[in-house]
Image (cartoon, rainbow, N blue to C red):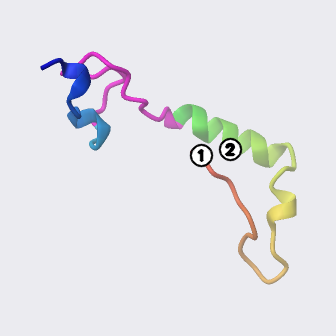
């Protein structure tokens, strides 16, 4: 049976690598450095201002996925 037909561990577990060592496929790891920079830019651009609820908290917010 081919590795492509099996559910690999990287599908349900963070393996800490961009390419799975078991099957050789992309693991879709999140690059948190890039996400954090994008979030800071989103705030700096004023896009977060409309999310602020007058009673505290956010109405809608940042989603990284």
Q: Which residue is mark 1?
A: 64
Query: Disc 1 or disc 2, which is closer to the eye?
Result: 1
Between the residue at mark 1 and the residue at mark 2, the CA separation in whole angstroms equals 8 Å
Determine whether label 1 and label 2 are within 8 Å by CB.
yes
Where does the N terminus fall, quadrant-wise? top left
Name, please, the residue furthest toward the bottom.
55
In the image, which residues are magenta? 15-32
Question: Mark 1 vs mark 2: which is more N-terminal?
Answer: 2
- How many callouts does the rendering have? 2
64 displayed left or right of 13: right
Q: Position of residue 33 (x, y in %)?
A: 54, 34
- The residue under label 2 is 39
Q: Secondary structure at mark 2?
A: helix
Residue in the image at 85% along x and 79% along y = 54
Image coordinates of residue 64 in percent, x first then y, are: 59, 46
**Residue at 68% in and 37% down:** 38
């Amino acid at each position: 049976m081919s590795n492509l037909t099996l559910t690999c561990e990287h599908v349900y577990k963070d393996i800490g690598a961009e390419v799975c060592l078991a099957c050789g496929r992309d693991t879709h790891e999140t690059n948190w450095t890039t996400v954090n920079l994008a979030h800071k830019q989103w705030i700096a651009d004023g896009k977060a201002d409309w999310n602020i609820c007058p009673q505290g908290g956010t109405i809608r917010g940042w989603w990284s996925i």
